[in-house]
Image (spheres, helix red, strand yellow):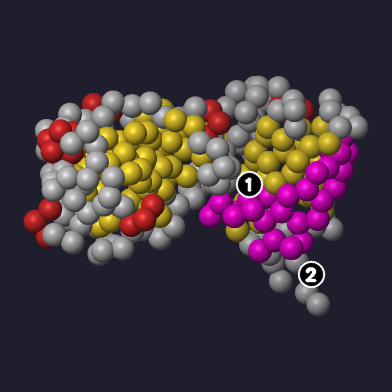
Amino acid sequence: MKKQYLIIIAVLMLSYINTKAQTTIYSQNFDSLALSLPTGWSTTASGWVMDSVTANRSSGYTGASGMFNCVIKNAATVSGTYTLTTGAISTIGDTGITVSWAARRTTHFSDSSSSIQSFDFSIDGGSTWTNLPYTENAGNSTWAIDNAGARIMLPASANNQASVIFRWVANLHKTPSGTYRIDDFNLEGTTTTGIAELANDNTIKMYLDNSNVLHIEDSQFQGKLSQLSIIDVAGRMCAKEMLDINNTTYSLAFLKAGMYFATISNDKSVVTKKIIITQNK
């Protein structure tokens, strides 16, 4: 059997996080999806749909992608609350998360007392939600970036998460007309080099030996358990273990070649390091 060699490259930060400009983490313009919601997105009782009326599909504002958008209509639903929820988005390796989208709220949507009740995010699969306050566009039937064009900043709890989901909550009153549309949903973050949530986290060391075993050391946290998580670039959890990281080992022989993120978390700190694994046969 040919031997596999795993190489782990962890860029360590001594005191401060070395950051870059914000880059796009996720973008959804709905344009290539015909009449289906994006993969992973969902809605309550078919309340939010892709508009089937060709004349209404194109969004119109500076920088708009055009073509398709997602809409909820007063006439197409009974009165009630309807949510639109995104698929899971990984923010591993990013901080300073911001979000934006374009919206068009018609005059009759506002006149009917229908409203977008809230915009929220969750990092635990939807068990709990955190509201993100923002300013809704005027109900004047005009396309524009919501929140007066300013990106909405997420709290630090959204940083370095394997799964972040968002939802719009619409409270509708059934009337013959009135719509709310969204387009060009965009999530951005600042990619970090050797992510360290706290400045004193350089006490944690990780290295791989020739036997494909990951060594983890933290001399200042002796005898207490920490959680090790290994996550791939798609946000999938590959491993999760509770370890005593004063001086412990963990085999990575099961991983395929590629980029991963190893996170150590305890009641003192959280440290995430980028892992590049290659397999030479």
User: Is residue 4 magenta-colored?
Assistant: no
The residue shown at (87%, 43%) is 248
Residue placed furthest toward the right = 223
Disc 2 target residue: 3
Q: As rendered, which of 55 and 90 lies closer to the eye? A: 55
Rendering quarter of residue 204: top right
Residue 79 marker: none
> Depth check: 231 or 123 in front?
123
For the residue pair 140 and 272, the one nearer the viewer reads as: 140
| Region in magenta | 230-256
How many other residues sit within 10 Å of disc 2, few (<14), some (14-19) or many (≥20)?
A: few
Q: Position of residue 30 (x, y in %)?
A: 28, 55
- Please state the horizontal and vertical placement of residue 28, each as a whole percent of the image: 33, 50
- Residue type, label 1: Phe
Residue 243 left/right relative to 110? right
Q: Is residue 161 left or right of residue 268?
A: left
Q: Indicate the secondary structure of the residue bearing disc 2.
A: loop
Is 253 in the magenta?
yes
Q: How far from the left and from the top, in percent, is residue 128? A: 55, 38
At 75% across and 32% down in the image, what residue appears? 266
Is residue 157 in sight in this rendering?
A: yes
Q: Earlier in the sequence, mark 1 or mark 2?
A: 2
Q: Label 1 belongs to which residue?
A: 261
Identify the image quadrant of residue 160. top right
What residue lies at 63% left-to-right and 30% top-to-bottom? 196
Which amino acid type is shown beneath numbered disc 2? Answer: Lys
Q: Is residue 42 above or below residue 222?
A: below
